[in-house]
Image (spheres, rainbow, N blue to C red):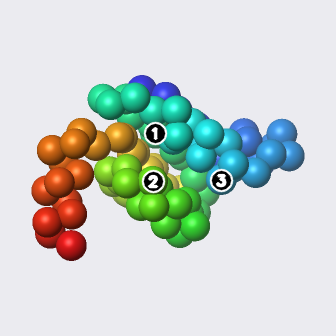
Amino acid sequence: MIEVNVLKVLAKGENPLTCIREVAEALAFGESVRVVAPFEPKPLLEMLEELELEVVTKKKDAFGYVIVFHRMTGNDLNKRRRKD
């Protein structure tokens, strides 16, 4: 599983959304990414939804969130679209 720590990205002066988008767009089926963030990243969640990635968000503790996402298979996408 690929891991992205938003605090480390911010410490480098980089935009976490740009970094995570690059990782997300390069994901193959079956690969997952775990993002650790100090806050619930609503813009990130919207971006991942647009990229049709399966996303699970959990509050880690009082100081952060963990977001895990992966690329869905064609069957998963079809099921999801039927729900919408």
Q: Nearer the viewer, residue 81 or 33?
A: 81
**Precedes in sequence: disc 1 or disc 2:** 1
Q: Secondary structure at mark 1?
A: strand
Amino acid bearing label 3: Leu
Q: Which residue is mark 3?
A: 17
Q: Is residue 15 left or right of residue 21?
A: right
The crowd level at tag 3 (other Cα within 10 Å; few <14, some 14-19, many 20+) is: some
Q: Are marks 1 and 2 in contact (CB under 8 Å)?
A: no
Depth check, mark 1 against mark 3: the one in front is: 3
Q: Which residue is mark 1?
A: 34
Find the distance from the CA under tag 3 to the CA under tag 2: 13 Å
Mark sitting on residue 51: 2
Q: Position of residue 83 (x, y in %)?
A: 15, 69
Rendered view: 2 above or below 17: above
Rendered view: 70 above or below 67: above
**Precedes in sequence: disc 3 or disc 2:** 3
Is residue 8 at least partly visible in the picture? yes
Amino acid bearing label 1: Arg
Q: Is residue 30 left or right of residue 16?
A: left
**Precedes in sequence: disc 1 or disc 3:** 3
The quarter of the picture where the C terminus appears is bottom left
